[in-house]
Image: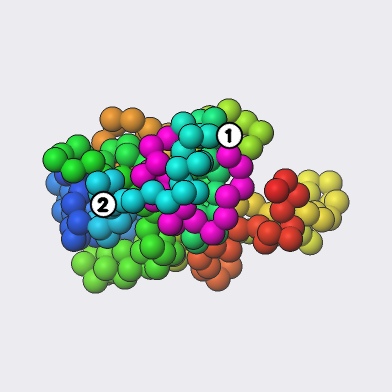
């Protein structure tokens, strides 16, 4: 039988800079009577990785430049927030009222470079969170640390919520990946009737991230880590999530 199980790591605390995410995950899995098994894949919400790595910016310490001030008026955002977005971006792709789409520093084309306030605990300072400095490296470190603690090195996906150009609503996508192939190029395989596949490429990492997002939720659910058990990736070498990115010269919509 082909089956896959997903379940969240329950009751994780709010994450702070410097926290050992792997140790917290292992401890809370044990508290719910679970432990990592060979073949498991962990999907982590980007926000807790960013928080643990200290990827937080105090808006009070951001001084917006002329470009940020001009864009802020256009897109109706705080100029300091816009400056933080520009500081973590390579290029502006689209800007209109309520929308600022950029190419983030690591190549992800997304709204606001992934910079936002959601699920960042309020305090004396107004904070916003950036994407991890290098989410693929973050995934690899988490995988290695989990291996140290448990003897099992699971696949690790770092998940973020992105919108789509032609569809309403966000979906989970992989911005970091370690220990599994993010893409399965099926060109050269055959369908049920023997026809050769000419252009089929399956984005395994995004499909797994999207599945985990259903359990994570988008608001106050408090389930930022999901275990996927029972999925067997194709026998391909592991690769980083940046392998998903379409080269700019092949992008038909910019």
Residue 61 in the image: x percent, y percent?
A: 26, 52
Identify the residue shown where x is 33% and y is 68%: 141
Residue 14 in the image: x percent, y percent?
A: 18, 44
Q: Which disc is residue 96 wearing?
A: 1
Residue 2 in the image: x percent, y percent?
A: 53, 45
Locate residue 10 relative to residue 105 in the image: left or right.
left
Quarter assignment of residue 87: bottom left
Q: Which disc is residue 61 wearing?
A: 2
Please say whether residue 222 is one of the residues in the magenta stretch. no
Identify the residue shown where x is 38% and y is 33%: 218
Locate residue 166 relative to residue 227 in the image: left or right.
right
Q: Nearer the viewer, residue 218 or 187?
A: 218
Q: Is residue 55 above or below residue 228?
A: below
Identify the residue shown where x is 74% and y is 58%: 250
Quarter assignment of residue 101: top right
Q: Report the colour scheme.
A: rainbow
Identify the residue shown where x is 58% and y is 50%: 92
SS for tag 2?
helix
Outermost residue, front direction?
66
Locate residue 71 relative to residue 134 in the image: left or right.
right
Residue 231 in view in this figure = no
Q: Which residues are magenta?
A: 77-96
SS for tag 1?
strand
Residue 224 in the image: x percent, y percent?
A: 31, 43
**First-in-chain label (2 vs 1):** 2
Q: CA distance from mark 2 to mark 1?
A: 26 Å
């Amino acid at each position: 039988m082909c089956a896959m199980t997903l379940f969240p790591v329950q009751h994780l605390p709010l994450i702070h800079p410097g926290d050992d995410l792997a140790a917290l995950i292992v401890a809370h899995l044990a508290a719910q009577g679970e432990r990592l098994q060979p073949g498991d894949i962990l999907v982590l919400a980007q926000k807790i990785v960013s928080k643990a790595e200290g990827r937080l910016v105090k808006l009070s310490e951001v001084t917006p430049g002329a470009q940020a001030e001009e864009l802020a008026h256009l897109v109706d955002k705080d100029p300091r927030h816009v400056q933080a977005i520009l500081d973590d971006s390579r290029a502006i792709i689209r800007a209109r009222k309520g929308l600022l789409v950029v190419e983030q520093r690591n190549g992800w084309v997304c709204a606001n470079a992934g910079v936002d306030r959601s699920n960042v605990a309020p305090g004396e300072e107004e904070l916003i969170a950036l994407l991890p400095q290098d989410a693929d490296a973050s995934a690899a470190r988490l995988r290695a640390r989990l291996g140290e603690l448990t003897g099992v090195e699971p696949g690790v996906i770092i998940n973020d919520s992105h919108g789509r150009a032609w569809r309403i609503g966000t979906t989970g996508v992989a911005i970091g990946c370690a220990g599994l192939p993010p893409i399965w190029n099926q060109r050269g395989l055959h369908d049920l009737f023997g026809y050769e596949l000419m252009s089929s490429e399956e984005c395994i990492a995004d499909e797994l991230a999207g599945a985990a997002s259903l359990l994570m939720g988008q608001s106050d659910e408090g389930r930022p880590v999901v275990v996927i058990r029972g999925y067997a990736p194709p026998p391909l070498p592991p690769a980083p999530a940046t392998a998903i990115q379409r080269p700019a010269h092949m992008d038909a919509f910019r």
